[in-house]
Every structure is written in C-alpha cells, then in structure tokens.
Amino acid sequence: MIPNLFDYQRAASLDEALALVGSPGTKVIAGGMSLLPLMKLRLANPERLVDIGRLAELKGVRELPDGRLAIGALTTYSELAVSPARHYGLLGDALPDIGDVQVRNRGTVGGAVAHCDPASDLPAVLLALDAEIVARSKRGENVYAADGFFTGAFSTALAEDELITEIRLPGPRDDAGSAYASLAQRASGYSIVGVAAIVIKEGGSAITKAGIALTGVGDAPYRAKAVEAALIGNEGTPESIAEAATHASDGVTVNGDIHADSEYRTAMAVAYTRRAIAAALGRLG
Amino acid sequence: MAEHMTEHIALVVNGTPREGDVEPRRMLVQFLREDLELTGTHVGCDTSQCGACTVTIDGMAIKSCTMLAVQADGANVKTIEGMQAADGSLHALQEGFWAKHGLQCGFCTPGMIMAASDLLARNADPTDDEIRHAIEGNICRCTGYHNIVLAIREAASLVRAGASAPTPTSITA
Amino acid sequence: MATAVQDVLGTSVRRTEDPRFITGKGRYLDDIKLTGMAHLAILRSPYAHANIRSIDTTRAKTMPGVIAVIVGADIPYNPLPMAWPAGGASGLQNNVSTPRTLATDSVKWTGEGVTAVVAETPEQAIDALEAIDVDYEPLPAVVDAEKATQPGAVQLHENAPNNIVFDWTVGDKDGTEKALAEAEVVVRERLVNHRLIPNPMEVRGDIGWYNPGTDEYTVWMSSQTPHIQRLLLTAFVTGIPEHKVRCISPDVGGAFGTKIFCYADMALVMFASKLIGGGRPVKWVESRRESYGSTIHGRDHITYVEIAGRRDGTVTGVKVKTFANLGGRLSTIGPGIPTTLYGRVLSGCYKIPNVYAEVTGVYTNTTFVDAYRGAGRPEATYVIERAMDLFANEIGMDRAEVRRKNFIPKDAFPYDNPSGLGTAVNGEKIYVDSGDYEPAMDMALKTAGYADLEAKRAEAKTRGKLLGMGLSTYIEVCGVAPSKWIGAVGEGWGAAMWESSNVKVHLTGKVIVTMGTQPQGQGHETTYAQIVSHELGIPMDDIVIQHSDTQGTPFGYGSYGSRTSSVGSTAAIKATDKIKDKARRYAAHMLEASVDDIEVDGAEYRVKGSPDKKKTIQEIAFALDLGFSLPAGMEPYLDETAYYDTPNCTWPFGTHIAIVEVDEETGETDLVRYVAVDDVGKKINPMIVDGQLHGGIAQGVGQALWETAVYDDDGQLLSGSMMDYALPRASWLPSFELGETVTPSPVNPLGVKGVGEAGCIASTAAVANAVNDALSPLGIKHLDMPFTAQKVWHAIQATKGGRA
Ligand SMILES: Cc1cc2nc3c(=O)[nH]c(=O)nc-3n(C[C@H](O)[C@H](O)[C@H](O)COP(=O)(O)OP(=O)(O)OC[C@H]3O[C@@H](n4cnc5c(N)ncnc54)[C@H](O)[C@@H]3O)c2cc1C
Ligand code: FES
Ligand code: FES
C-alpha cells in the first residue's frame, strides 16, 4: 500500500532528465500507472524518482512532412484517442479498452513502451504498424524499429541512460486495413491475448503486406512472422485466414496462469488472430 | 537508512489554494485525506483497481491512489467535497445519485461521481453502454450498477436541461 | 396545527442517509482521526502451514517512529470464541480451534497474524514490519476439504482427527435411503460451490482506545454487530468487564456478512492502546490484499447430491453429502453456516417427502470461512436447483414443469417439512410461513420468453453463440430467528436472536429512535423512519434513527440474515405501539374522557363523537414530557422500549431467469438478460428493495461467472488481489428486469419478509443452470462454476473428443 522511501526530482528540461537517467537506483516516472502500483507493493524500490511528467517537449502528436505521425512519449492514451492517431483502425479499437478512463488519462505512450509488460496492448500495435521508437541520451538520438525492441518481459532494447522521446507511425494509407482484437483477463483488464493486425493490398485482390503482432501470449509482445508470410499473396478467404492464424504462436513459449493455461492461450491466440485479420480485411472493403 | 527529503507542494483543491510538505512517497489520496482532511475520497484497494479514490485534475478523472502528491504539485484538483455549488445546491450528479438510489453503502459513490463527471464533460448524452464503459475503473459492490446507470443518465438529462439541479428541501418532497 | 402527514410507508422516498454520502461527508472507520492516535500494522504469515520457532523483533524496535512491537506471547487473552457449534446441545462434537489475537506457536493459513507493530504513522508501522525476523518451520499444507478428511492427509489440529470439525446430519435418513432404493430414477452428481472473497468496498479496521482515567475502552470497528462484539470481546476474549467497553460502528462501507464476526484485530487494538499508555488510541486498517487473509471468505462446498423420483416428474427424495471447508481455524459462526443455514433449507420450495443431509465441516490451510451474503442458502439453492435441472433433463421433462409439479402447494402453508428440516434438536420448529410459487414463476417465464427458448437458441447459433436459459425457483429463510429455536438448547447459536427498539417523542415533538440493528448500506435510517412516521403520524423529517453505538442504543443482535426488516422493524412497531398506548391514556387525561373513548388517527387522538375534542401526539408529548399534570401512576415522558422475538422465520421466494450466451470458439460467457420475479411480502420502500435485489443479483452472477478464490497446493492464494480476483464491473452486466408478486408474511404485522440476500441466493443457480443449458446441446451434463472462458472452453473441447 505504501512505497518505500525514495527521493524525488522533477526534471525541468529534457537535458536535465538525461543527466539523471541511468544513475544507479534511479527510475524515471511519467504517468506512474505501471511504476506506482509496483512501488506500492514494494516490488519496485527505486532510491530516486526522476519525474519527466512536465516535459512539454515530449507531449503531443504531430504530422511529419512525409505523412508519418510523431507521438510524443508523454502523450497519454486519452490524448492519443482524440488525436489523428485514432484514424488508424487498430488504435481506434485498442485505445478504449486499455485500462479504464482514469488509467488512460494518466498512462503515457512512452511509459507503456518502456515498461514492456508482457500483456501490454500498445507494443503489439506498434509492432504491427512497423513503428519507430525514438530515444535520446546524453550520447545523442537513437531510432529503434519496433520489431526487435521488445526483448522480453519488462525488458526492451533501450539503453540504461536512454529516454524514449517519440514514437513514429508510418503514414496512413488507403490500401491498408487494420484492427485490434483482444480477450481480457477479467480482473486486471489486461489482455490474455491481444492481436494487432494490419493488411495491405497494393492494387489487386491479394494481400501484399501484413503486420500481425500479439501480446499476452509470450514473454514479450511479438510479430507473428509465420502468420504474415501465410497471408502474403492470399486473397483473404475465411479458410485462408483461418489457416494463416494457426501459426499465431509458432516458435513462442506460451504463458500459462490461473486465468488461461498455455493450451487455452494458444487456442485463443489463433482465434483472436483470425478475428483481427478478418476485421482488418473488413475495413479494407 | 539514508535521510530522505520532504517536498513542498502547492496546489488548488476545490478552488482553494492548499500547500503542504510531503514525503515523496505520499500518494495524492493520502495528502487529500490525511493532510487536508478531505475524507470523502476513499481507498478501496491497493492495486489501482477499484476507483474509490477517483478525483479530477482539470476535469479529468484520475486515481489518486496511483499518483504521488508531488506529481500533483501545481494541479487543479477537484474532489467530491467540491461538487456542490457555493450556495450548497447539489451538482446534477449528486442529485441523480440521490434521486435514482444510485448508492447503498456510499463508499464507492464519491469516486463514481467523479468518474461520471469526466464522462459528462466529454459526452452530454451518453448511452447506457457508454455509461457502463465510462465507470469501468470503478467498482461498486452494493448496487449491481443498475441504479448507477440510471443516476448518471438522470444527471446527464439534468445538465442538458440546463438546470443546476435544485436541492429538494425535504426528502419526502 | 395537525396538517395531515403524508403516509410514506410503502413508498419510494429518497434515502435520509444519502446527503452525507453524496457530498463526501460519510464517516467510515478510516475517516476517524483522534488526538494522539498511533497506528498498528500486522505481520502476517507467508506460509499456509508452519510452526513458529522464534520471532526476533530487535531490529523493528529501533525503527523510526516505532512505539511497540507485540508478539502473541505478550497477550494474555483467550482465543476468539466460536459461537455457533453445529448441533448445539445435541451432543455433537465440534473440534474447536479458533484464532488467537496473534498466533503463538503455529500458523494455519497464509495471512494469519503473527506480530504487530505500533508506530507514530501508518508508513512507519509498515516499514518496521520488514525488520521483523520470524523463523518458521514450514509444514505441508492441504487446501481441499474433501482431501483433507482422507487418511494420510496433513493434520492441522491435534483435537480434530482427520481435520474434521463436526459431522452433522439433518433429515430422515431411513426414509430417504428407501426412497432412493425404490425410485424409478436416481440422478447423482458432484457439485462444487467454489470459494469466494466477499470484498465489501470498504475494508475492515478498528480503533482501540483505553482511557486510563476511567479504566474504560472504546472500540470503533467497521462491524455489523457492535453489541455482539462487546459481549464476545469482554465475556470471552479479554476478560475485561462488559460495562467497561463501548463499541461503535461508524458508517460501514458494505459488509455482506464479513463484518458480523469477532476478529483478532479488535482485541489487538484494545491491548495495544493500553500497552502504549498515555491514553493513546491505536488504529488498524487492513489493506485490500491483507484483507484476503484477515477477513473471512465464503462458500467452498463440495457436495454429492442424489435426487430420486418418478418419471412423471415427482421428486421423492434428495440425499446430500457435503464437505464444508471452514479454513485453518474457525470464525465466529463458521460451523453454523453449512449446517443450520444450509442443511435446513435443502428441499427449497419443493414438497419433497424425504430429505437427508450429512455435512462434514473441515479444517484446511486456507482463510477461515463464514457467512457471506446468503450464507448457506445460496449453497443450498445451488444444490437443489441444479438437482432439479439434472432430474428434469434425465426424465426428459421441461424444467419449469418439473418445478411446478413439486412446488409446495399454496394451501399447504404454514408448511412443516416432513423430514424434520425445520425441527431443532430441542423439538422446536420453524415452518415455511407462506408462499404461492406458481404466479411468480409464470410471470418470470413470460417476461423471459421461455416459450421461445428454442427459437432464441437457433438464432444465437447463427452468430456462433450457444444460448442458454436457466431457472432458479428459490426460497430463502429470512428474519432469523425465534430465540427458542436458534438458542442454546435449540440449534446451537450460543445466544438469542430477538431485536430491540427504543422510541422517544421529545418535548418538541421530535422523535429519536434507537435500534439494536446496524446498517451497512441498506438505508435503515430511512426505512425505520418510514415505519415510525406511519405509526405515529409524525413527519419523517421529525424522526431520526440512531444505531451502531453500544452506548445509547438498546442491545441488539445486529443486521445480517435478512432479519432487520422483519425482526428489527417489528421491534420498532412494538415500541410505537407502547408509545401510542401511553399517549392515548394521557390524551384521555388531557381531554377528560375515558381511555376507551379515545380514537387514534395518525397524529390525532380524538374523543369519539366529539371531533373537536382532540390532541395531537406533539401536544401530548409536550405535556407528558413536562409532566406537570399526570394521572395517578403514570410516569412522565413518552419513552418506550420494546424487545421483539419473532415466532417464526419468514420465507421470501421467487423465480429468477438468466439468459446467457457462450462463444463456442472461445468459451467466453456473457449474461445477456436477467429476469427476476421476487415475492418479499410487503415493501417498506420499494426503491430500496429493488436496490437490494440488484446488488444481490450482481454478486450471485459474479460467483457464477467470474469470482473465484484459487489456492495452489501449498496454500498460497493465487487470486490474492483485485488483479486476479474478478469483481463484477458495470460493462459486464445488463440492467435487470424485475417483477414482483406480493404474498404478505403472516409472521409480522408489516407482512414483510426480508430481501438483503434474496438476489444473491437466487442468481448463482440461475446463471449456473443457464450455462449448463447452453452447453447441453454439446452433451455436457454438468459443469461447475465459475464459468470462466478457459473452463468453458476446456469443457467444450472435451466434447469434441480431442484435447481437453
Ligand atoms: C488499473 C490499470 C489497468 C491497466 N490496464 C492496462 C491494459 O488493459 N492494457 C495495457 O496495455 N496497459 C494497461 N495498464 C498499464 C498502462 O497502460 C501503463 O501503465 C501506462 O501506459 C504506462 O505509462 P506511464 O506513463 O504511466 O508509465 P510509468 O508507470 O510512469 O512508467 C513505466 C515504466 O516506464 C519507464 N518510462 C516511462 N516513461 C519513459 C520514457 N519516456 N522513456 C524511458 N522510460 C520511461 C519508467 O521508468 C517505468 O519503468 C493498466 C494500468 C493500470 C494501473
Ligand atoms: S484505491 Fe482502488 S483504485 Fe485507488
Ligand atoms: S454503494 Fe456500496 S460500494 Fe457502491
């Protein structure tokens, strides 16, 4: 209920924050929606918190000249939901069901990405979209591809001294359809299985590109490459989608807990992958 | 154990500037309840699940058990104690909850009302489904939510009618 | 003056208590802040079963702000009392082990209190817990009640061989065996009624204050029963004289049974306050996670049911064998729940000639189990209502028709159960007071569209959904209970169960009513005022209802068992009867008439035939309270107390119908409609009655679909927080469709029956029957609750002959 004692410092600028990040015992806090629950249970016990919550330069959603969307790391889910990002079908699906309104009013995009909860929804969305994660440190800027960034439960490719500053989504395109479908763990609201799907048909009736990513299933959110491969060249018939979806957890050690043993979770990964792909195709018209 | 500093914070609570020196680990809910003695905001869990602690910051509902008091430095906080008008008349949500029997033990009620105020600010005419979705972060163990939905719907219609909901002078009125 | 006062009895007036709650001015336990108050935190066992070798508190004592560190050996108190031995005076052995204020040499579940710290702030108390070193000798654990009774199982207590608390029986053994042997059809099933964590939104807590000046204690507690707690804490636990202790229950943020009991922490804060001296109060408030081990759990039965009957649908016998898990040590009335409140209602609303039940109460390494909303009756309803469905399905008869055929007919009341379910060991009986079951069922069937079930099923199937409809034609025993039935020589509760009320009409005509009952959200301040207003003709606004403080209220047994409206209200009416009688006698004196000539009409006391000669109750109170002119032998003041012992229990009933849809591919199960037709007799305030039903229905649905306490084999609670224990949320539930029939109870003058638990008693079985109905086309005969997506999915897979 009550965290251990710690010191607190609010960063007045990004540079000040970067000067503090990475020193031993120091943790960054943004919205606190992941960190504070852990600290209250004394599962996380930082010596010092650096509050980046006020850094205006990390807030807001901008359209880049090339059509890409740049989302400041401190953008909350609620802000995202009323930004141009909501036009991405899969984000429109995912956002209203992440936590509850109170969590969405505080929880940030950067925090969700950095925390990398194995059941977190946003990382799956970013994976499917081939997003970029922009990080800064005293050493300079670093751009990570989402694919490869989420390395395990609560672990990412981010270096100790780096802060996430921005997430970049590829520009919207008319030949893409996307959707997010998830099965919630009733008590926590987190996903037992969450599937982000984007399918692209460049001309023709066949799928030419696909991004399928799952959360909740394994150690970390992942791209289901075998599903994507099976979809390429595919016309998107119910049978072919169903077949592609059977590869949803190929090569993944599937989690099991009291809410979903690994057998059930595996089956749900398949079912929800099929549903997400079908919904994405449905939006493509 | 190393010495740890306290922090000075200043914020506006229910329209009144308030200050205090707090341990950084002090949650906003404890600052409100224990330091400011605004005990209308409740604590119902320790895992950020129940919403009994909901207050608004600039009109947005947040869980005050999952926000450090130092994070609220400079913020504009509203709690259930700030919902009545200066003349004591009830807010439409308070009126709605009373009229529709939207509470039993009353423990979840302040948080419910604050969460609902966030909804009504965004959506003046919510459907039942929208209401149910908007209070997903708030658990009520007494009412089965049935009358809470009616209460929020009633409040929305009071707000739309423009009437600052009157306080009945007698409960039998 | 006497303008006619609006009669509010039976109307949906707004609640008197709400203004404070909707403005944030309620005063719950943790809102109380007293001068000099210190804070207590409890270190709890991480093991489900262990011996305590030693406790080292040296480091903790040096931590900042620490005032005292307390271990069990420091405390001279007795173990907590167990007040409801199953079987009472029947000689049945109850192998009792109850918690101590803090554990001394062993722990029996994760969460049993071991050491306490008192510090200046709650933070410091919690910090210091981490500096206590307890050396445990871990022991193997057992968590399943049936397994715990088997040879070779881990033993918890020396005085309880095979972990058995008691073996209790009720009913007609020989008759039932014979009925089973001769029956055309016998259906047998094993039913699990899984464990729940009640979760009122306000957790428990207490503040103890020892006043060295007066040598008296005050204990604030979030409790349903402050009078009982004072009795138990003084006479049984601490040895402090009863008149030296005052118990106060402030606003209670929900309870659902959990706050009936005597808990170790209550004694602990009393001890701690005296220990630290200086007249400092000591506060303890559990955290939610802590409460999962420090406050009781509910249900947890494993039952073997056999139902016998004829192919024409007549049920001829029901035999039940139940293992009731009571936890690591016994809670205050733990043994009473699976016996009196369960076994005695196992025949439901049916005229079943032969019923017999055996219940084994069992110790396991789990949190103690006691009364949770419905307490025994939801378990019984689940057994009989599932059994009726299983029987109907077996003989291929419609589920509603089988019920109709076996209902106790409406001319059979008061109904004396032929197998003796209503007969206590001292021969005293309770009867099913009244009922008319068919109209309620017909109304529910019609509202739910039961006749179109197959069409609905077919439509859902086109959407990949399995639709099911489930009935629960429940009855509930409320208004517990006649003292001579439940009392010492009757069923086993070591006390009586009457209620009390004091009514005073003050000089100014304002009324103060004090009650022995204790609300937790039910709106007593409103409903009692409605009754008193109706009886005395005084406006509700001039009446206040006080409760919950042993100082200033008459002794009462508190609120639980849906007893307040029938037993408590009748006490209030008896008190107002006395007030009216005295007022009438005094009006005769004032009006110089004979008492027989005074007629009472609301607030007016008139001389028959001379309508101008009258006095209002306010005028009478003014004069009588002053007492300047009194008739011979009359005392001044309108102040009357009544104690009321009910002659019988009351028996609400009704039919609930749940409609569910199961996603055949994922096992996800949704409640899509819920229809409830209840007969709770007359209603004091229909709005409040509906609210009680809504909340009860949601809790019962919660059990059927989502809620479940899960232990691993080592006794670790895997659903140990709200992150893993799923409480119903708004978007998972539909709005409920309520209907009513009204069969007034003949037991009390208001004709009320009680409603606090009805929704919860009926709904679990309705949903369970609905899900089983939905799954029946796949050939599934019975699936146990909770119908989590994963469990339903596995059951469906098993029917496909593949993986399970
Ligand atoms: C009740 C509840 C329900 C929830 N339900 C869901 C759900 O359904 N689905 C879901 O996906 N999530 C859910 N969440 C989690 C929520 O989405 C995340 O907690 C939130 O988005 C994290 O953002 P934050 O700003 O609050 O992070 P914080 O808690 O402030 O930080 C989290 C971690 O990220 C680090 N960090 C934060 N910002 C940065 C940065 N810019 N650069 C580098 N490191 C950083 C911090 O040091 C910390 O380690 C839920 C949370 C709660 C409390
Ligand atoms: S107290 Fe439960 S969410 Fe804040
Ligand atoms: S009214 Fe009691 S928890 Fe909602």
Image: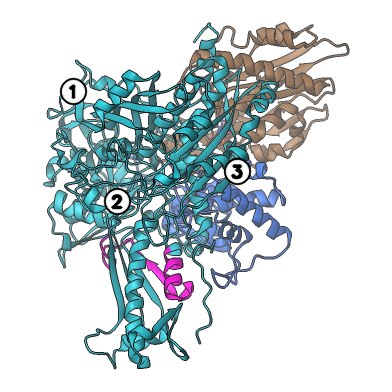
Chain colours: A brown, B blue, C cyan
Q: Which residue is mark 3?
A: C735
> Is C536 a magenta residue?
yes
In reply to whether residue B77 is colored magenta, the answer given is no
> What SS does tag 2 mark?
loop
Inter-mark Cα distance, 2 to 1 = 33 Å
The secondary element bearing badge 1 is classed as helix
Distance from the alpha carbon under mark 3 to that under mark 1 = 47 Å
Residue C691 in picture, x, y percent from top left: 51, 51
Residue toward you, C389 or A9? C389
Up-down: is C289 above or below C8? above
How crowded pointer 3 is (Cα within 10 Å; few <14, some 14-19, many 20+) is rated as some
Kind of residue sitting beneath label 2? Ala
What percent of the width, then of the height, locates residue C651? 39, 47
Chain letter of the residue beneath label 1 in the structure image: C
Span shown in magenta: C528-556
Q: Report whether residue B58 is seen.
A: no
**B158 displayed left or right of C610:** right
Q: Chain of mark 3?
A: C
For discs 3 and 2, the disc positioned in front in the rendered view: 2
Numbered disc 2: what chain? C
Q: Residues within 10 Å of mark 2 (few under 14, many from 20)?
A: many
Q: Quadrant of residue C658?
A: top right
Q: Are marks 3 and 2 in contact (CB under 8 Å)?
A: no
Q: On the image, numbered disc 2 is attached to which residue?
A: C481
Question: Of marks 3 and 1, which one's residue comes earlier in the chain?
Answer: 1
Residue farthest along the right direction in this orientation: A203
Q: Residue at x 71, y 6 (%)?
A: A230
Mark 3 residue element: loop
User: C607 and C299: which one is in front?
Assistant: C607
Instruction: Look at mark 1 in the image and give the residue it sits on.
Output: C162
**Mark 3 vs mark 2, CA separation in Å:** 33 Å
